[in-house]
Image: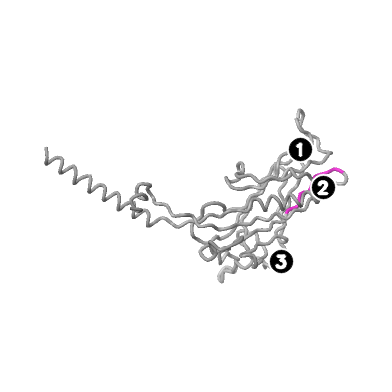
């Protein structure tokens, strides 16, 4: 009996040691992470001021904590502007004057490995009935550390053009979804063999700027909302300031029990 207890004791000690070493191994392989935090209050207040100056209600803009599909579960800007009066709503519509919202999201957001951000993804969902959304890439800009201002380049496969040439705007018609990758002009390089333009440098070196004060990088996105039809219809011009701060994420142990043990 005593021998069996001794064997079991040695067995459990060995198993505990193996589990402990496995947890330490996993812990060593875990990547340090940061959090990419968008400045939601500044985005909402700035866009609201622009809409009010153009004669629209303060309620026409809202920042959502999470976007509905096909958007990601991340901060999203929602715009709700009146539809043209000439629009004929579907039969039985409860609110003939209002269509669906227009939503804009810039990724990545939230937890991110301690690795460079290669580029940004701009997503636009147009759920309106009669409003066309146009994204003007040449009038948009990317800022790093508050001083480095660069021109936005929409990344398309097989780019062989001169970056100095004007870019085609992206048009998002009602009930359409746009998702496109962008970066700054200085991140591109030309492949020596194929002469194809490629992303040769990251947009943001997180390791260098994490923890520094103020917005670490920003995208000022220029969009135009153009109602279809209706006499006197005029475009709505907006500058959407997406500002991001990089915050360190406290390291956590792979297994909570190990986290408690390591602190002893």
227 inside magenta stretch = yes
- Which residue ends up furthest to the front in the rendered image? 264
Question: Contact (CB < 8 A) between labels 1 and 2?
Answer: no
Q: Which mark is residue 165?
A: 3
- Residue 56, given in percent of the width and then of the height, sits at 79, 46
Q: Rounded to the nearest whole Å, what is the CA distance between mark 1 and mark 3?
A: 39 Å
Residue sitting at the far bottom: 192
Disc 1 target residue: 98
x 60%, y 59%: residue = 157
Label 2 packing within 10 angstroms: few (<14), some (14-19), many (20+) = few
Residue 159 sits in which quadrant?
A: bottom right
Q: Quadrant of residue 148?
A: bottom right
Instruction: Tell me the magenta residue range.
Output: 223-230
Mark sitting earlier along the chain (3/2): 2
Q: Quadrant of the N terminus?
A: top left
Q: Nearer the viewer, residue 114 or 246?
A: 246
């Amino acid at each position: 009996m005593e021998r069996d207890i001794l064997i079991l004791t040695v067995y459990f000690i060995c198993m505990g040691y193996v589990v402990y070493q496995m947890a330490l191994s996993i812990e060593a392989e875990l990547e340090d992470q940061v959090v990419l935090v968008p400045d939601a209050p500044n985005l909402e207040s700035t866009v609201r001021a622009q809409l009010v100056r153009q004669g629209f209600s303060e309620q026409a803009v809202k920042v959502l904590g999470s976007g509905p599909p096909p958007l990601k579960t991340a901060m999203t800007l929602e715009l709700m502007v009146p539809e043209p009066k000439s629009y004929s709503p579907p039969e039985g519509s409860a609110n003939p004057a209002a269509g669906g919202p227009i939503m804009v999201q810039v990724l990545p957001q939230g937890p991110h490995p301690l690795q460079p951000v290669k580029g940004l993804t701009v997503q636009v969902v147009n759920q309106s009935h009669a409003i066309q959304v146009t994204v003007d890439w040449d009038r948009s800009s990317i800022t790093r550390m508050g001083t480095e201002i660069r021109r936005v380049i929409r990344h398309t496969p097989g780019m062989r053009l001169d970056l100095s040439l004007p870019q085609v705007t992206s048009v998002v018609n009602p009930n359409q979804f746009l998702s496109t990758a962008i970066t700054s002009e200085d991140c591109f390089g030309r492949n020596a063999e194929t002469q194809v333009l490629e992303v040769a440098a990251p947009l943001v070196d997180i390791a260098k700027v994490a923890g520094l004060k103020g917005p670490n990088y920003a995208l000022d996105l220029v969009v135009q909302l153009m109602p279809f039809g209706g006499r006197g219809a005029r475009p709505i011009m907006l500058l959407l300031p997406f500002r991001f701060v990089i915050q360190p994420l406290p390291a956590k142990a792979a297994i909570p029990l190990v986290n408690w043990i390591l602190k002893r």
